Amino acid sequence: MKNIKEDEKLSILNHSCAHLLAQAVKHLYPHALFWVGPVIEDGFYYDVDLGDDVIKEGDLEKIEKEMKKISKDGKRIYREEISKTEALERFKNDPYKIDLIERMDEDSTVISCYTQGDFTDLCRGPHVDTVKELKYFKLTKFSGAYYKGDSKNKMLQRIYGVCFTNEEDLNEYLNELEEAKIRDHRKIGKDLNIFTSHDLVGKGMPLWLPNGAIIRKELENYIYKKEQKIGYNHVYTPCVGTTNLYKTSGHWDHYKENMFPAMKVDEEEFVLRPMNCPHHMLVYANELHSYRDLPIRIGEFATDFRYEASGAVKGLERVRCMCQNDAHLFVTPEQIGDEFKKVVSLILDVYKDFGLKNYKFRLSLRDKEDKEKYFDDDDMWNMAEDKLRSVLDEYGCKYYEAIGEAAFYGPKLDVEVKPAVGPEVTLSTCQLDFLLPRRFNLSYIDKDGTKKTPVVIHRAIFGTFDRFTAFLLEETKGILPLWLSPTQVNIIPVNNEYHSEYATKIFEILKEEGIRTSIDLKDEKLSYKMRESQTKKIPYTLILGDKEKENNLISYRIFGSKETITLDTKEFLSKIKNEIENKK
Ligand code: TSB
Ligand code: ZN
């Protein structure tokens, strides 16, 4: 979807449209006061104080109508530059504008106002020349928004909109918006009973419902099998560690703002872990190692807790309690290239299995100036970044570079994907680390009998099961492949009275075969039940009536198809088992 903020012309248009919105609101609610109205990725919004009024369903249409009227009038938009004193005088009855003006430095900021007809707003601009240019717009949604984003402050009304230069672009954008709403994993997750949340559990702490748990278990089994085949050993470690553990690793100094605060138990002080690396370092340290043992690959489906800002948490995509498909690979310096390539091939292999095509590789580097976020050792960083870059170039992996996105311990190769709503996020990651093995005094005995420090590669293929599931739901619009579907087969007897016995027999057979099956014996019409099966996006719907019962057959419809196919029960069984087995 187009990023309006990044398009200069559209930015000006949308910002001007925010003023048009404010003018219309002022006409309809003369007591309205305005806070800020910025351009955002998907258009613009304006935060408005309507006193005791709140925006309700249907109000946006009224405001839009007024905006159209003003636009037709076609008033010119005038810019005026004024002194701070004059600005304070002019907006003296408007506490929100006074707040803005008071924070302006007269020497460095030009204070400007824009006027169109009966409406003047304080604004840096620039704007279009006349309101006539603001013709192809739509108010898209509204919400409450605290003044300055602080929940202790008054709740303002935020009205969102978007504006284009022509009708075609607007319609295309609105269609995309509609599509994004359908794809949004939060909606799919709710409709298909995949996950939920509850205030009593907390923000960003999703509850995986039975359907979600099936998906997650299947994903775990899938990646576990892959990792077993290529020499990973899985472990279980606790999801807490002492603060000393995280002081040793460096998280305490460089990652603390992402961590939940410490808690005291007897004489020990614990934190909920934000990452699993320190635990895995200690798993490695449990034994002496020779160069012959390396690479050692320690994997875990590990629960982590991170402090994410409350405004940033989002469905399963950005959570405060997550489960990583994590592993730490302990290698000799000579093995870095090969091992890194193996991780990248695993990522590509997995993406191919899931049919994921829309992703980008990002080489995430440190910001040299930021000594707080990044461990301060230029030599180490230069070595790690050069090594990673050369491995990627050698591998022929296309990527773009991003400064300031590295982990505090080393540079990363991140795979970026675009969710239905909001900015891009990282899914898979593969990171090169010279630091943690040093901080934990890890070693192996090299060929010449001397002690050496291994290098660590941190990697997560799915990233977290949470984020991967969110993305998968959006990519598939909730239409999951058979092997991942919570319910694989739904059985509907044509007539409960005559066919439920046969339907139940088939249900038991399928269940016995390990196929996730449901049977619909509700007292409803066949057509209703068929529709419900579609709504639940169940891959196979079996419709069993006289013909099927008498001849031991089954008739089925595949999700999205109107064609009914009849097969011998045994034949159907082997077909579906084969499809599940081969992850078709
Ligand atoms: C790969 N120590 C490494 C690990 O060994 C690590 O923790 N890397 S990470 O910080 O990049 O996190 C791994 C992955 O977790 C990310 O690539 C991302 O896909 C996922 N992730 C990070 N934060 C969140 C979050 N708040 N919600 C859901 N998933 C997240
Ligand atoms: Zn790690």
Image (cartoon, helix red, strand yellow):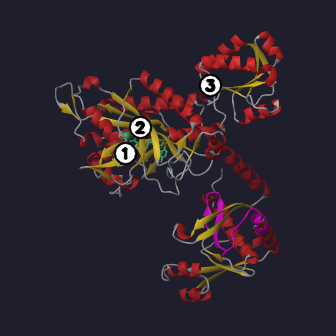
1 and 2 marks in contact (CB < 8 Å): yes
Tell me the residue that label 2 is attached to. Answer: 302
Residue 21 horizontal/vertical position (percent): 71, 70
Residue under numbered circle 1: 273
Q: Amino acid at mark 1?
A: Arg
Residue 124 appears left or right of 376? right
Callout 2 amino acid? Ala
Q: Nearer the viewer, mark 3 or mark 2?
A: 3
Q: Judge whether residue 57 is colored magenta.
A: yes
What amino acid does circle 3 point to?
A: Arg
First along the sequence among labels 1 and 3: 1
Please tell me whether mark 2 sits on a helix, a strand or a loop. Answer: strand
Spatial separation of the CA atoms under disc 1 and disc 2? 10 Å
- Residue closest to the eye, 58 or 514: 514
* Residue at mark 3: 516
> Between 142 and 266, which is closer to the camera in this rendering?
266
Q: Quadrant of residue 295?
A: top left
What label does residue 36 carry, if any? none
C-alpha separation, residue under disc 1 versus residue under disc 3: 35 Å
Residue 433 visible within the image: no
Indicate yes or no whether the magenta region holds residue 280. no
State which image quarter holds ligand 2. Answer: top left
Magenta residues span 38-63
Identity of the residue furthest to the front in this view: 497
Residue at screen point 66% across, 44% down: 183
| Quarter where residue 514 is shown | top right
